[in-house]
Image (cartoon, grey):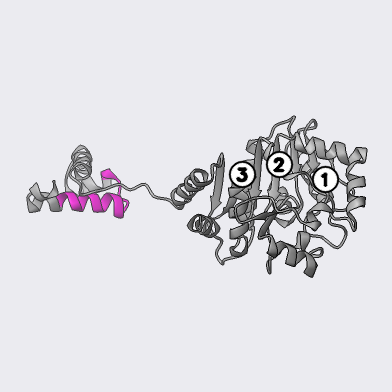
Amino acid sequence: MCATLDREHARLLLDIAHLYWDKDLSQDEIAERLGYSRSTVSRKLTEARRVGIVQVTVAHPIERLMALEEELTSAFGLKQARVTEVSRPFVPGVTPDVARAAAELLVEHCGPRSVIAVSNGRAVAAVVHQMPERTWPTSTVVAMIGSAGESYDLGDGGDVCRNLAMRLGGRYRSLTVPLVFDSLNLARAVRQEDQVATTLELAARSDVALTGIGAVGESTSPLLRKWMTPQVVRECRRRGAVAHVCGHHLDAEGRHVPTALCERTLCMEPERLKGIPFVVGVAAGEEKVTAIRAALRGGYLSALVTDEVTARAVLEGN
C-alpha cells in the first residue's frame, strides 16, 4: 500500500512516525515543530500504521522462552514448563533464576493444607532457598528419600524438609535413616519400620513433589557419587542407566533400571512417584540433558524447570 502514496506524502508520514516512535516526541511537540494541529498529527500516525509505514512488533525475550515452554509441554506431555534466560556470565547448573522459577511454580500448586514431598540435592535445596514465606501451619513437607549423611552438605533430606517447612510455616517429616544401606537385608528391614513406612506412604500420597534429576556417568551427581563403586558403575553401564530420579536409575527411554544399588537405597518406589498429582523436576546444564530427557520420557514429571540452553538441547535430541 505504501507504493500508492506520492513521495511527499509518504515522506511526511515517515517524518512524523520517526519523531513520535524513534525520537519519543509527544504529538503536541510534533505539531508545534511541523506546524500542524495535534489532531492532524494523530491522524497521520494512524495512517502511517494503516498503510504499513509503521509496523508494530510485540517482542520480548520471554516470548521466546514461552515458545520453548510450549514445545516442552507438547513434546513430553507435561502439564507445565518454565524456561529461564541463561545467566550472563554463563553459570552452569541450577542458577538462582532457575531455582526462583521452580519455587514460583511450586507455590502455585501448593496451599495451606498441602502435603509436599521432596527429594535431596543441590537443585532442590536451591529451590527451597528461593521459596516465598507463607503462614501455612497445616501444611506438611515430607521426605521421599533417605539421608545422604554428614559428608553430603549439598542439600540433604532432613535439611531440605526442615528449611521448606520453615518457609511455609508448616510441619515436616524427614527420614532419619541412611539413603543407602550396606546390605539388602538391612535395607528391607528398615523399610518395614513403622516410622519409615508411614513417612514413605505419606510422601506417596502427597499433593505436590519436588525433585532434582541426576546424571549417571562421568558427571554423576554428588547425591549418589560416594556409592558409585566400580562394580556399580559397570552394572549401570551394562544396563544402560543414564539418569537417576529420587534414588532410582533410568535408561535413556525413562524405564526403571533395577540395580544392586537401587535395592539398597531407601526411597519411594518410582511408580509411586508417577502417582503424585504434580511433580516438579528441576535441573539444568549440558551434563544433565540426557538425564532430563530420560525422566521426561519415563513420565515421572508433571513439570520441568530449566534454562534456555538446556531446554533447546533436550528438545533437539528428542
Q: Is residue 69 left or right of residue 300?
A: left
Quote the CA–CA distance across marks 1 and 2. Answer: 26 Å
Q: Which residues are magenta?
A: 12-28
Residue 214 coordinates in the image, percent (x, y): 69, 57
Quote the CA–CA distance across marks 3 and 2. Answer: 10 Å
Res. 110 in view = yes
**The image quarter in which residue 133 lies:** top right
Circle 2 crowding by C-alpha within 10 Å: few under 14, some 14–19, many from 20: few
Q: Residue at x 8, y 53 (%)?
A: 7
Sequence-wise, which precedes: disc 1 or disc 2? 1
The secondary structure making up most of the magenta span is: helix
Residue with the mark numbered 3: 299
Mark 1 in CB contact with mark 3 (< 8 angstroms): no
Instruction: Residue type at mark 2: give it.
Output: Glu
Instruction: Residue type at mark 1: give it.
Output: Arg
Circle 1 crowding by C-alpha within 10 Å: few under 14, some 14–19, many from 20: many
Residue with the mark numbered 2: 271
